[in-house]
């Protein structure tokens, strides 16, 4: 660490689903000195564009100018709140939701900002939870399996509708004019760094997990042509770009971005990264066997291993995908906190439902839920699946359903943990980050269902702190991300411990959850997919 680091600061910026948050961090010890947030004015577009143009089922778009608003507003406000001289800020790092994709011109201008395309849905940012590309994802998975593509095993045997290729193929097939006008298909994690530096550098994390880049290569031109002849040049023409490694500098802050942020022109800008993956550094959980669950509207599970093994239904295993020198594994649940919110009646609050639900004993409500209200990311990788509440009667109360939904998401996490361990990726510590770690009911249920203690990150701004740690490494204040995390990250170990009596009940319920999971999710009953197909026909008619 440099001698000046005790008077040096970095800024981490976390771009979430509905807002962006900036935090100012002291390089010497990771102390968080100031923070500020900026809500995206357009939030998530699910029904229509700002102009009123309607959107289809399972669409989720965003407006890229909202991201720049975070740089203009949250960063200066965080620096002001910290009370530090902006001249002492040595670097800025960012993290983003993923896979969130921006179609742009060659200079990075989003197509939706061009007047000719302002009313075209495919010209907008496709947010991570845009699930309308499931048919394309199914075709990619089937073709890869039929051809014996070696990269498929590193994604658990299935490619998600959330990822770059499925969304790109949907764009081509539904609006070929926009596809032709699009010069670059850019992860938002890289687009925001492009705005900060004026240079487009593709980060190794999203390229590996979301862009099917393995061992230095993407799916072949022949594979893409077999999907659709017009898709053959997708990688070469729209996607491929020099790769930046995590913790490196992508470039330096441009004069334009310095004007937005109030930070010094020329400071280091870290290579882009994903919200979940940067959090492992903030939680000091970079060693093999330490699983970090970032729990918010959705949950992402990240764990490192010494070698690559095939884990069914995972979101990928990438060499250096979390930290250099280890294989990073990713899994996830595409709906968690937003499912909780779905079951809060207008006359209730999360706090009141949590209080009522916490007074119950495990199993008291008589319910069992499948937590697929936003589809299933892991281990089934199927966003045509939907939620299910079993056991409801006229006596069922809102707090009953609320607790059952919390338990269902814990069962989903247990399914992921057990899948990792059966495949040979041991989980020796479970570390929680994200907003849901503040909910005592959620934490105790997870500890009981998982039958293991839960550690928690020592920061309420885990992703932003992780981005700041990567910024410190990019500035050269530490030799690498691991060293920066040791000095700047923090964690509280075994904060929540399982209750053996509750765990015994949950073992019974988990057995039934698994039966339902496999019956509806593994092809024995395709009613959920059929219902979606009927709905699509009804909407089109």
Image (tube, rainbow, N blue to C red):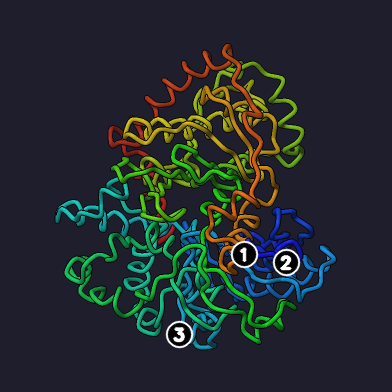
Q: Nearer the viewer, mark 1 or mark 3?
A: 1
Query: How many residues crowd mark 1 within 10 Å: few (<14), some (14–19), many (20+)?
Result: many
Answer whether residue 17 is visible to the viewer in this image: no
In the image as oriented, which residue stretches furthest toward the front?
3
Query: 10 Å neighbourhood of mark 2: few (<14), some, or many (≥20)?
Result: many
Q: Secondary structure at mark 3?
A: loop
Q: Which mark is residue 105?
A: 3
Specify which label sits upstream in the sequence, 1 or 2.
2
Between residues 515 and 203, which one lies in front from this camera angle? 203
The x and y percentages for residue 349 are 75, 39
Do the residues under discs 1 and 3 have CB atoms within 8 angstroms? no
> Is residue 374 among the parts visible in the rendering?
yes
Judging by the rendered image, the residue that carries numbered circle 2 is: 8
User: What residue did someone put label 1 on?
Assistant: 477
175, 129: nearer the viewer: 129
Judged from this view, the residue extending furthest toward the left is 147
Q: Position of residue 118 (x, y in %)?
A: 54, 81
Place of residue 452 in the rendered image (x, y in percent of width and height, measured from the top left): 54, 24
Do labels 1 and 2 touch, CB within 8 Å? yes
Q: Foreground: 96 or 355? A: 96
Vertical side of 231 occupied by 105: above or below: below
């Amino acid at each position: 660490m440099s001698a000046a680091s005790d008077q040096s600061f970095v800024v981490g910026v976390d771009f979430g689903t509905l807002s962006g948050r900036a935090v100012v961090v002291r390089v010497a010890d990771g102390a968080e000195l100031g923070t500020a947030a900026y809500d995206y004015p357009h939030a998530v577009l699910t029904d229509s564009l700002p102009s009123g143009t309607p959107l289809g089922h399972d669409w989720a778009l965003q407006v890229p100018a909202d991201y720049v608003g975070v740089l203009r507003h949250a960063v200066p406000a965080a620096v002001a709140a910290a009370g530090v001289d902006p001249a002492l800020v040595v670097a800025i790092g960012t993290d983003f939701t993923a896979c969130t994709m921006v179609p742009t011109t060659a200079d990075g201008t989003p197509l939706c900002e061009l007047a000719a395309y302002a009313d075209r849905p495919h010209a907008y940012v496709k947010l991570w939870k845009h699930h309308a590309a499931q048919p394309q994802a199914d075709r990619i998975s089937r073709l890869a399996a039929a051809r014996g593509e070696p990269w498929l095993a590193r994604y658990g045997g299935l490619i998600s509708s959330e990822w770059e290729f499925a969304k790109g193929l949907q764009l081509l097939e539904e609006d070929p004019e926009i596809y032709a006008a699009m010069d670059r298909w850019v992860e938002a994690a890289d687009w925001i760094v492009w705005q900060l530096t004026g240079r487009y550098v593709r980060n190794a994390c999203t390229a590996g997990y979301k862009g099917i880049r393995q061992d230095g290569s993407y799916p072949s031109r022949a594979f893409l042509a077999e999907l659709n002849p017009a898709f053959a040049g997708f990688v070469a023409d729209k996607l491929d770009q020099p790769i930046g490694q995590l913790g490196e500098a992508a470039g330096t802050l441009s004069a334009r971005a310095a004007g937005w942020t109030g930070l010094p022109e020329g400071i280091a800008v870290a290579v882009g990264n994903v919200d979940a993956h940067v959090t492992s550094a903030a939680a000091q959980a970079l060693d093999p066997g330490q699983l970090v669950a970032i729990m918010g509207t959705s949950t992402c599970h990240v764990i490192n291993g010494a070698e690559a093994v095939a884990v069914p239904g995972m979101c990928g295993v990438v060499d250096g995908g979390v930290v250099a020198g280890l294989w990073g594994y990713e899994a996830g649940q595409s709906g968690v906190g937003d499912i909780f919110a779905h079951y809060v009646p207008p006359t209730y609050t999360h706090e009141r439902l949590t209080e009522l639900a916490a007074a119950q004993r495990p199993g008291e409500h008589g319910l069992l839920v499948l937590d697929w209200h936003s589809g299933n990311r892991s281990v089934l990788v199927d966003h045509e699946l939907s939620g299910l509440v079993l056991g409801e009667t006229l006596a069922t109360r809102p707090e009953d359903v609320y607790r059952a939904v919390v338990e269902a998401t814990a069962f989903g996490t247990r399914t992921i943990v057990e899948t990792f361990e059966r495949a040979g990726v041991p989980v020796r510590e479970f570390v929680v980050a994200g907003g849901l770690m503040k909910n005592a009911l959620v934490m105790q249920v997870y500890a009981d269902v998982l039958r293991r203690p839960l550690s928690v990150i020592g920061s309420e701004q885990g992703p932003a702190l992780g981005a700041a740690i990567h910024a410190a490494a990019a500035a050269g204040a530490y030799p690498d991300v691991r060293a920066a995390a040791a000095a700047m990250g923090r964690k509280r170990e075994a904060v929540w411990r399982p209750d053996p009596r509750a765990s015994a009940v949950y073992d019974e319920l988990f057995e039934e959850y698994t039966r339902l999971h496999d019956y509806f999710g593994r092809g024995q009953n395709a009613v959920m997919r059929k219902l979606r197909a009927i709905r699509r026909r009804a909407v089109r008619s």
